[in-house]
Image: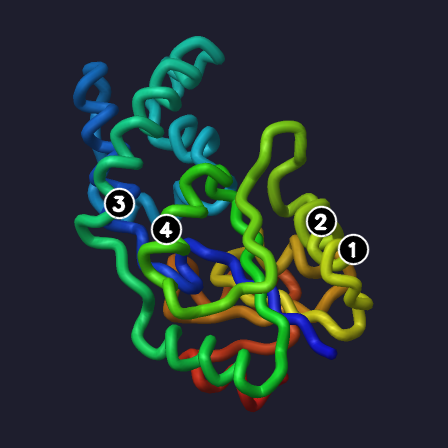
Amino acid sequence: MKLIIFDLDGTLLDTLQDLGDSCNAILQRFGYPIHQLPAYKKFVGNGVQKLIERALPEYARTTEIIATLLMAFKSYYEEQTICHTRPYIGIVSLLEMLKSSGYLISVASNKYHEAVIPLMEKYFPTIAFDLVLGHRTGHPAKPDPDIVLDTLRTLGIAKENCYYVGDSSVDMDTANNAGVTAIGVTWGFRDETELRQHGAKHIIHIPQELLDVV
């Protein structure tokens, strides 16, 4: 049996607008400069704390300030996720085809776990994921392979039967660090050059191309 692990933001869900809008709202609330949406493509990928850190001006990147804005961001973002977030075109049908073909499917995200679960319930209510994991307290964030290795142990799958699908260098590094096949997607937040530079074994440009790879 084969397992396909998906990243969430930039791979299954287009969350950039809501992440950027939420972060800008918090920056503005605390008197810091805001950013144009394209900048957030480089800010996201390593978890919400890193997002806040990158969005802040260098002089404000203290532990105390980051912690304060992080708490405010989480509260604001959880109320705003229904505004613009949506699955990428073709994702739902891809997931349905994978399940009907007997694949195991799971999610491994750097978004904090408490935010991942409601997103999955809202946008993929008909898809029976075998496991969904966001970033959990006490666990290292990607590109540490912990979340992938934990998924493999939980589902009882060997590394050689696992594919990891994501849109960023963080995802490709995670897959390679875990010893599973790295598949990069170009419809997300980063470009093909970055994916290849970080060890993508396969590159796909539309969701249905994944069926040709796995």
Q: Is residue 200 visible?
A: no
**Which sits earlier in the primary sequence, circle 1 or circle 4?**
4
State the residue position of label 4. 119
State the residue position of label 3. 81
State the residue position of label 2. 145
On screen, residue 160 versus residue 88, left or right, reads right
Work out how far the residue at label 1 is from the one at label 2, CA to CA, in angstroms: 12 Å
How are the residues colored?
A: rainbow
Asked whether the residues under the numbered discs 1 and 4 touch, taking CB atoms below 8 Å apart as contact, a structural biologist would say: no
Quadrant including the N terminus: bottom right
The residue tagged with tag 1: helix, strand or loop? helix
Q: Quadrant of residue 58?
A: top left
Quadrant including the C terminus: bottom right
Percent position of residue 173, x then y: 65, 55
Would you place residue 2 above or below residue 36 in this image? below
Q: Identify the residue at image location x=61%, y=45%.
A: 142
Report the amino acid beneath label 4. Leu
Residue 34 disc label: none
For the residue carrying disc 4, how many other residues have a C-alpha within 10 Å: few (<14), some (14-19), or many (20+)? some
The residue tagged with tag 3: helix, strand or loop? loop
Would you place residue 62 above or below residue 111 in this image? above
Report the amino acid beneath label 2. Pro
State the residue position of label 1. 153
The residue tagged with tag 4: helix, strand or loop? helix
Work out how far the residue at label 4 is from the one at label 3, CA to CA, in angstroms: 8 Å
Q: Is residue 158 visible?
A: yes
Asked whether the residues under the numbered discs 2 and 4 touch, taking CB atoms below 8 Å apart as contact, a structural biologist would say: no
For the residue carrying disc 2, how many other residues have a C-alpha within 10 Å: few (<14), some (14-19), or many (20+)? many
Asked whether the residues under the numbered discs 4 and 3 touch, taking CB atoms below 8 Å apart as contact, a structural biologist would say: yes
**Which sits earlier in the primary sequence, circle 3 or circle 2?**
3
Asked whether the residues under the numbered discs 1 and 3 touch, taking CB atoms below 8 Å apart as contact, a structural biologist would say: no
